[in-house]
């Protein structure tokens, strides 16, 4: 039986146990969605979150998948650290202004690297460059490039 999404759920749990103590009590629903033109996204409401993953990621190896999932968990951690009003404000800003969306995505990338997943995040970005989805050109400016990830990894190590 094909249990790819089951493996994703196990990975999410492992990453939380190891690196996201704040998310241990968060109820996270992880599932595959054929209706998205990008790799994955997440949405949260109080103690519940949802992660949608594109079937395109079935072609990814564990490291490429880990990079993706850790980035999504980073979004949930940001959500948990903000109160209700701050989250409303952040969503509002990010949906209206590209500049804030870029800042948010790149800050999530930096958090992912600080937690020790820089290599996986970089692998995921290289994967995305290789297998461009429909939104690749539109979205690529919002994220750190593989080179920028490498730079930030070196910076974090020096601290
Ligand atoms: Zn993101």
Image (cartoon, grey):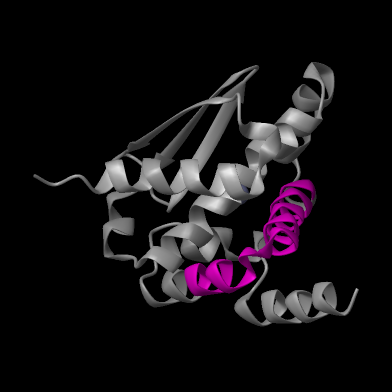
Vertical arrangement, residue 125 with respect to residue 8, above or below = below
Residue 32, position in %: x, y?
Answer: 31, 40
Residue 147, position in %: x, y?
Answer: 66, 82
Camera sees residue 91: no
Residue 97, position in %: x, y?
Answer: 76, 44
Say whether residue 104 is magenta: yes
Outermost residue toward the front? 18
Name the residue: 81% across, 28% down. 82
Say whether residue 77 is magenta: no
* Image-quadrant location for residue 33: top left
Task: From the viewer's side, name the closer residue of 13 and 78.
Answer: 13
In magenta, the rendered stretch is: 100-125
Prevalent SS, magenta region: helix
Outermost residue toward the right? 159
Vertical arrangement, residue 109 with respect to residue 15, above or below = below
* Image-quadrant location for residue 78: top right
Name the residue: 57% across, 66% down. 121
Camera sees residue 124: yes
């Amino acid at each position: 039986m094909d249990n790819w999404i089951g493996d994703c759920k196990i990975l999410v749990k492992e990453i939380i146990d190891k690196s996201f103590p704040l998310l241990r009590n968060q109820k996270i629903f992880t599932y595959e969605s054929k209706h998205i033109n990008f790799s994955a996204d997440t949405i949260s409401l109080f103690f519940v979150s949802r992660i949608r993953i594109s079937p395109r990621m079935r072609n990814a190896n564990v490291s490429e998948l880990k990079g993706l999932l850790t980035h999504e968990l980073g979004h949930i951690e940001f959500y948990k650290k903000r109160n209700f009003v701050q989250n409303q404000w952040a969503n509002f800003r990010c949906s209206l202004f590209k500049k804030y969306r870029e800042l948010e995505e790149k800050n999530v990338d930096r958090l992912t690297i600080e937690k020790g997943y820089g290599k996986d995040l970089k692998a995921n970005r290289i994967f995305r460059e290789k297998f461009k989805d429909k939104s690749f050109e539109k979205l690529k400016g919002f994220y750190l490039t593989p080179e920028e990830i490498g730079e930030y990894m070196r910076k974090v190590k020096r601290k």
